């Protein structure tokens, strides 16, 4: 799924700055980091839904649930061979799970990306892709402490056109 549409939860300014600080720490150390991507659309976020395609949808019920608490609980790695995705695992609080289900209830049935469907969702905020697993201890030492913040808005990311749309 390279050309996908996703619905993303954006973070409050303090939490976004906290994640960007981790991106910067990794980049400064010469490690893989999402901070290396300079696009205006590159923002820390929590992905709620990913599909190969998705017609525009109103997410009114989901928007009424914002802000929602977001807890960066602990670092986690999704390993693939000798590399992996480094991310903050986000605590799946009842409020966050309810928001996730509400977003999915607003769309017709479709082909969800792995680990994004209700019951299979792995809430996380990505810090680095293709991080060498041999560098993991050093990378973990660079990250800040756990953090409690909030998800404050939703956006739609269309990978094919590289555009974002704020959802109101």
Image (tube, rainbow, N blue to C red):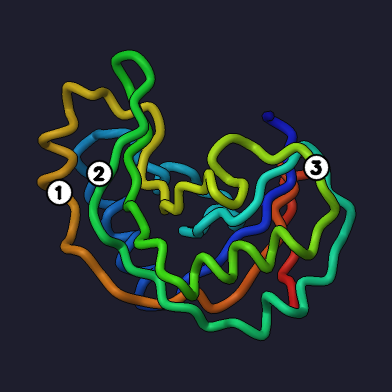
Q: Which mark is residue 110?
A: 3
Q: Which residue is mark 2?
A: 26
- Across and down, in percent, residue 79 comes to 34, 25
Q: Quadrant of the C terminus?
A: bottom right
**Residue appearing at x 50%, y 58% in the figure:** 46
**Residue appearing at x 37%, y 34% in the figure:** 85
> Rounded to the nearest whole Å, what is the CA distance between mark 3 and mark 2?
36 Å
Q: Is residue 55 left or right of residue 103?
A: right
Contact, CB < 8 Å: mark 3 with mark 1?
Answer: no
Q: Which mark is residue 97?
A: none
Disc 3 packing (10 Å; few <14; some 14–19; many ≥20): few
Q: Nearer the viewer, residue 17 or 6?
A: 6
In the displayed structure, would residue 118 be above or below residue 131? below
- Across and down, in percent, residue 103 comes to 69, 64
Disc 2 packing (10 Å; few <14; some 14–19; many ≥20): many
> Residue extending furthest top?
81
Q: Quadrant of the N terminus?
A: top right
Q: Which residue is mark 1?
A: 142
| Helix, strand or loop at mark 1 | helix
Contact, CB < 8 Å: mark 3 with mark 2?
Answer: no
| Helix, strand or loop at mark 3 | loop
> Rounded to the nearest whole Å, what is the CA distance between mark 2 and mark 1?
7 Å
> Rounded to the nearest whole Å, what is the CA distance between mark 3 and mark 1?
39 Å
Give the mark nearer the N terminus: 3 vs 2.
2
Q: Nearer the viewer, residue 77 or 144?
A: 77
Contact, CB < 8 Å: mark 2 with mark 1?
Answer: yes
Q: Is residue 78 left or right of residue 159?
A: left
**Residue appearing at x 18%, y 39% in the figure:** 139
Give the mark nearer the N terminus: 3 vs 1.
3
């Amino acid at each position: 799924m390279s050309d996908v549409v996703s619905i993303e939860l954006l973070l409050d300014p303090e939490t976004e700055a906290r994640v960007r600080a981790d991106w910067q720490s990794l980049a400064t150390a010469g490690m893989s980091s999402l901070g290396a991507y300079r696009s205006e659309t590159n923002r820390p976020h929590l992905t709620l839904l990913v599909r190969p395609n998705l017609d525009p949808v109103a997410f009114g019920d989901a928007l009424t649930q914002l802000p929602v608490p977001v807890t960066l609980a602990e670092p986690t790695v999704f390993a693939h061979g000798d590399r992996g995705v480094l991310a903050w695992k986000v605590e799946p609080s009842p409020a966050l799970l309810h928001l996730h289900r509400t977003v999915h209830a607003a769309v017709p049935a479709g082909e969800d990306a792995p680990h994004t469907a209700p019951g299979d969702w792995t809430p996380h905020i990505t810090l680095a892709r293709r991080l060498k697993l041999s560098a993991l201890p050093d990378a973990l030492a660079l990250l800040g402490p756990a953090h409690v913040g909030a998800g404050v808005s939703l956006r739609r990311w269309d990978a094919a056109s590289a555009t974002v749309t704020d959802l109101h």
